[in-house]
Image (tube, rainbow, N blue to C red):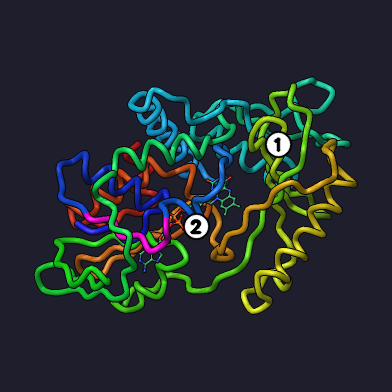
Amino acid sequence: MAVVGAGVVGLSTTAALLQGGADVVCYERAGAPMAQRSAGSSRIFRLAHPTPDLVRLARAARAGFGRWEQAADTPMIIPSGCVISGNPAQGWAAAMAAAGAPHEIVDAPSGGLRLPALTPPSGALLDPAGGVIDVDAVRGYLIGVTRGAVAGVQVYAIEDTATGATVWSPAGEARFDAVVLAAGAGTSPLAAQVGIYTPPALAHHVRFTFPIDQSVAWQSWIDKPSAGLATYQHQSGPGRWAVGGEIDPELMAWEMGREVAMSASGEAVLGYAREHLAVEPRIVDSLYCVTTPGLGDGFEVRRNGSILAVYGENLFKLAPLLGDVLAAACTEGSTPAVPDVAASH
Ligand SMILES: Cc1cc2nc3c(=O)[nH]c(=O)nc-3n(C[C@H](O)[C@H](O)[C@H](O)COP(=O)(O)OP(=O)(O)OC[C@H]3O[C@@H](n4cnc5c(N)ncnc54)[C@H](O)[C@@H]3O)c2cc1C
């Protein structure tokens, strides 16, 4: 089997294939694994999602992180809770109720919120099983269990054949029974070579970090107010608070270039922090990545013959589940979809 991309999705798939006893080559073109969309030290984990199926997937993924935590003997999810405020709160609460996931609607005076908000939200959804993913711990574990399977070369061509697939890289031509394209921003051009459509558009995204009081176990926070900047925020280390915003897409369009996008989003997020957050309004770090705009939560898998392509947004929190699902799809020849995967968990 071959996996293209050693981001969190490709490494999780490689790990699951290896665990099932398969011979696997995972191709990675960057100098190091998990250095593109999976870079950085932290992500939000949450059961809270817009549909019951996605809540079920997140719960299955949490169980997967639990297995990784046991195997690595190290915590990977910091269970500080996750708060959803603004427009999605009620709908996401209904999805959690339908999936039987613990949740609560909380108001600031109840004392249930630990957010650095100058004006705390009311009627917010609290997902007590949510929190922060320790990306460094996940990276360390996945690199350890996939050691020896990762080839540090770029795949520049693939072809579906009657008996499998052929992959071309600087290491030469190689034949495989199945190939999973988990190449993040590089998936679409490779998938197109074998007639699989995945959304090709690219956009810039930047998350900024501010100093914050480190004595509080802050909850992660997704805020989508009816007016003003929609943000996601979470603790990204001791005394560190990361904030990403839904910046005007015209400012983040691919053609604008990285520097313009960094500067426009930095200005918007710093202005937001000054006005709304109890943080020191000083950017101490930033994390840039290339995203595919407009996908939303969840994942999509497309197949042509023995080649599978996967794409989606916010895939980190689903990684252990996605790895298992893609590995099974490789060996069984199936094409997984969210409703089927949710129904089986
Ligand atoms: C700032 C930021 C904040 C985020 N916040 C959250 C969050 O809170 N919660 C959450 O769940 N998710 C979050 N996400 C999204 C999540 O991190 C990504 O969905 C996930 O990391 C994607 O992993 P991936 O393996 O699909 O892609 P990647 O990590 O990009 O991996 C793809 C790999 O493929 C390699 N590659 C590409 N083309 C080729 C080729 N031709 N040959 C060989 N290798 C190739 C690339 O070098 C790359 O390493 C966030 C992302 C960012 C950037």
Answer with left or right where residue 224 lies relative to residue 321.
right
Q: Residue 224, percent across and down?
A: 73, 49
Answer with left or right where residue 37 lies relative to residue 220.
left
Q: Which mark is residue 240?
A: 1
Q: Residue 27, percent across and down?
A: 30, 60
Q: Is residue 27 magenta?
A: yes
Residue numbers of the magenta segment: 25-31
Label 1 environment density (alpha carbons within 10 Å; few <14, some 14–19, many ≥20): some
| Residue holding disc 2 | 36
Assess mark 2: CB under 8 A from ligand 1?
A: yes
Q: Which mark is residue 104?
A: none
Q: Looking at the image, which residue is at 19% across and 61% down?
A: 178
Q: Residue 204, percent across and down?
A: 62, 66
Q: Is residue 41 magenta?
A: no
Q: Residue 310, percent across and down?
A: 38, 60
**Residue 318: quarter of image:** top left
Q: Residue furthest right?
A: 275
Quadrant where the N terminus sits is bottom left
